Image: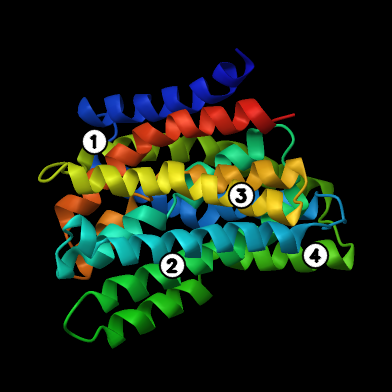
């Protein structure tokens, strides 16, 4: 019941976002504006506030990052290797692989990390920014690798986006402030906390609205397999690595939440812009959202404090 009470509000808000989009109260233009506000203000404020107010100890940060990055890369390599055996067309291979490994860290993972009890925020946020970079860079690489033409311009644009990503910038600033022992004035901290509280429900509403606009169709077998990779196989690999390396339970909880997150909705946009398989990408986003609800419930029930 505790797990239901923790997860149900998140998925109810996502469902509300879908309903609001369907009835016209959360139109496409509004979602775009809110997403930009969240990406540039709300979520960076939440990350910075969490880091500067976290305990100074970051013991276990390296192991947590190794587990998350290791599970992600193993999943990526596995899905890339098996794609031809599953009948994935050469031009769709990158789309299948990015759907299998790229989780929605900013709009699903971050709200969960900030609300689930038992998550060690200091070490978790230190590992969070490198994972954002890994997801963005690996997505571009696999999409380009499955296309016959060069995407040098797109690659440069994405690398520039990584450097200027507000969430990554906020993460670096928060780490520096925490390491230096500097805490902003009380008024600033209260403001950041208010922005963080605003960001989390708005992010979930936008996810629900975005899912209603994703055009699901085509072959269901491949997106279902990609969704299983993302929402089931990825956390299982992470769990095995964590136990092998001796990661403590709090950090393990944080890592599994990130690894069990559904496929990022932006993966559909990336596939569309870079000549990937739009139908495969869109269907995988929706299927993984359903699968991750079960996986996240299991993870939180087993490891949340």
Whole-angstrom CA distance, mark 2 to mark 4, is: 25 Å
Where residue 154 appears, as percent x and y from the top left, is: 30, 79
Tell me the SS state at disc 1: helix
Nearer-the-camera pick, 158 or 38? 158
Tell me the SS state at disc 3: helix
| Crowd class of label 3 (few under 14; some 14 to 19; many from 20; radius 10 Å) | few
Residue 136: image tag: 2
Judging by the rendered image, the residue that carries numbered circle 1 is 212
Whole-angstrom CA distance, mark 2 to mark 3, is: 25 Å
Disc on the earlier residue, 2 or 3: 2
Judging by the rendered image, the residue that carries numbered circle 4 is 177
Disc on the earlier residue, 1 or 3: 1
Whole-angstrom CA distance, mark 1 to mark 3, is: 35 Å
Disc on the earlier residue, 3 or 4: 4
- Residue sitting at x 87%, y 68%: 180
Q: Which of the two marks, 3 or 4, is nearer to us in this view? A: 3
Dots 2, 3 in contact, CB < 8 A: no
Residue 85 is drawn in which quadrant? bottom left
């Amino acid at each position: 019941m505790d797990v239901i009470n923790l997860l149900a509000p998140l998925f109810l808000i996502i469902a509300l976002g879908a309903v609001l989009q369907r009835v016209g109260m959360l139109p496409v233009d509004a979602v775009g504006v809110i997403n930009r506000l969240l990406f540039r203000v709300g979520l960076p404020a939440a990350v910075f506030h969490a880091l500067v107010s976290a305990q100074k100890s970051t013991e276990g940060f390296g192991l947590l990052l190794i587990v998350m990055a290791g599970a992600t890369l193993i999943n990526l390599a596995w899905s890339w290797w098996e794609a031809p055996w599953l009948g994935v067309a050469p031009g769709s291979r990158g789309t299948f692989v990015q759907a299998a490994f790229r989780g929605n860290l900013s709009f699903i993972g971050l709200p969960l990390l900030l609300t689930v009890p038992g998550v060690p925020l200091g070490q978790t946020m230190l590992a969070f920014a490198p994972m954002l970079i890994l997801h963005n860079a690996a997505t571009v690489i696999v999409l380009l690798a499955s296309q016959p033409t060069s995407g040098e311009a797109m690659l440069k644009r994405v690398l520039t986006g990584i450097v200027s990503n507000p969430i990554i910038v906020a993460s670096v600033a928060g780490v520096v402030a925490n390491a230096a022992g500097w805490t902003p004035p009380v008024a600033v901290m209260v403001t950041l906390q208010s922005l963080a509280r605003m960001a989390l429900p708005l992010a979930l509403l936008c996810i629900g609205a975005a899912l209603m606009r994703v055009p699901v169709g085509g072959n269901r077998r491949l997106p279902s397999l990609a969704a299983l990779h993302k929402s089931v196989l990825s956390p299982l690999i992470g769990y095995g690595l964590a136990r092998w390396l001796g990661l403590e339970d709090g950090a393990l909880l944080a890592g599994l939440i990130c690894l069990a997150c559904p496929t990022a909705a932006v993966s559909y946009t990336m596939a569309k812009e870079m000549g990937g398989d739009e139908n495969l990408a869109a269907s995988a986003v929706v299927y993984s959202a359903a699968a991750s609800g079960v996986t996240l419930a299991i993870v939180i029930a087993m490891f949340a404090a």
